[in-house]
Image: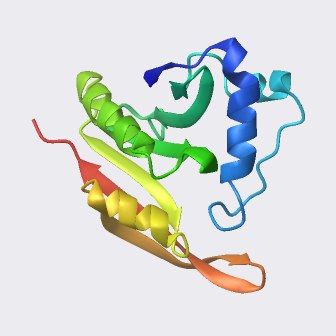
């Protein structure tokens, strides 16, 4: 498996993967792109990290500073997704290891993410990787008529 920054030709695979992964159980909004060009307009080549296996994008990792404030530049907010057909093969773990190393090299000291409280599989994965619950926005979303909390999780990168 190769982990590298995304290229323009990855757009179709990345778009397909995101359509499969970001569902009502994993995100409070609808994520849909009508074409690779539309995908690239929102996710330019080189902006995300991809895991590629046998020529197919099987994982996506995005991270960036959550605000333009100089006082907040040590924090990176992240999103990570693995194609359903390739889950439970260690791909997310490899992407997370890559992120921890790369973020540290780029001067980040804190990683942060948001996850729906009903996405227990993701919460367990993040906890396994050292993330802890930093905050909870109770009943932040109404999904399929049910209130769902939005959990903020964080990991401090050690020297």
The quarter holding residue 69 reads top left
Observer-nearest residue: 65 or 22?
22
Is residue 130 something that shows in the picture? yes
Question: Residue lying farthest right?
Answer: 34
Colour scheme of the rendered structure: rainbow
Instruction: Say whether residue 62 is left or right of residue 155.
Output: right
The quarter holding residue 91 reads top left
Q: Position of residue 33 (x, y in %)?
A: 83, 38
Residue at (28, 60) in percent of width and height: 128
The quarter holding residue 104 reads top left
Is residue 74 something that shows in the picture? no
Question: Residue lying farthest left?
Answer: 159
Does 118 appear above or below 134? below
Instruction: Say whether residue 107 is left or right of residue 24.
Output: left
Observer-nearest residue: 44 or 13?
13
Q: Position of residue 57 (x, y in %)?
A: 61, 29
Observer-nearest residue: 112 or 8?
8
Instruction: Say whether residue 23 is left or right of residue 149.
Output: right
Does 77 appear above or below 5? below
Q: Position of residue 114 (x, y in %)?
A: 49, 58
Q: Quadrant of the C terminus?
A: top left
Residue at (35, 34) in percent of width and height: 99
Observer-nearest residue: 151 or 123?
123
Does 114 appear above or below 1? below
Residue at (78, 55) in percent of width and height: 30
Q: Position of residue 116 (x, y in %)?
A: 55, 68
Q: Quadrant of the N terminus?
A: top left
Question: Residue lying farthest bottom?
Answer: 146
């Amino acid at each position: 498996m190769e982990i590298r920054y995304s290229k323009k030709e990855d757009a179709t695979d990345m778009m397909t993967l995101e359509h499969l992964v970001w569902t009502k159980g994993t995100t409070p909004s609808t994520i849909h792109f009508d074409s690779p060009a539309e995908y690239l307009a929102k996710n330019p080549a080189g902006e995300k990290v991809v895991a590629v296996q046998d020529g197919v994008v099987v994982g996506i990792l995005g991270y960036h500073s959550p605000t333009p404030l100089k006082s907040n530049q040590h924090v990176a907010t992240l999103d990570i997704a693995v194609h359903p057909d390739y889950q439970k093969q260690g791909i997310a773990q490899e992407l997370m290891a890559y992120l921890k190393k790369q973020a540290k090299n780029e001067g980040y000291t804190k990683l942060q993410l948001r996850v729906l409280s009903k996405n227990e599989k993701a919460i367990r994965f993040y906890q396994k990787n050292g993330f802890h619950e930093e905050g909870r926005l109770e009943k932040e979303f109404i999904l399929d008529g049910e209130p769902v909390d939005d959990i903020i999780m964080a990991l401090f990168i050690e020297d």
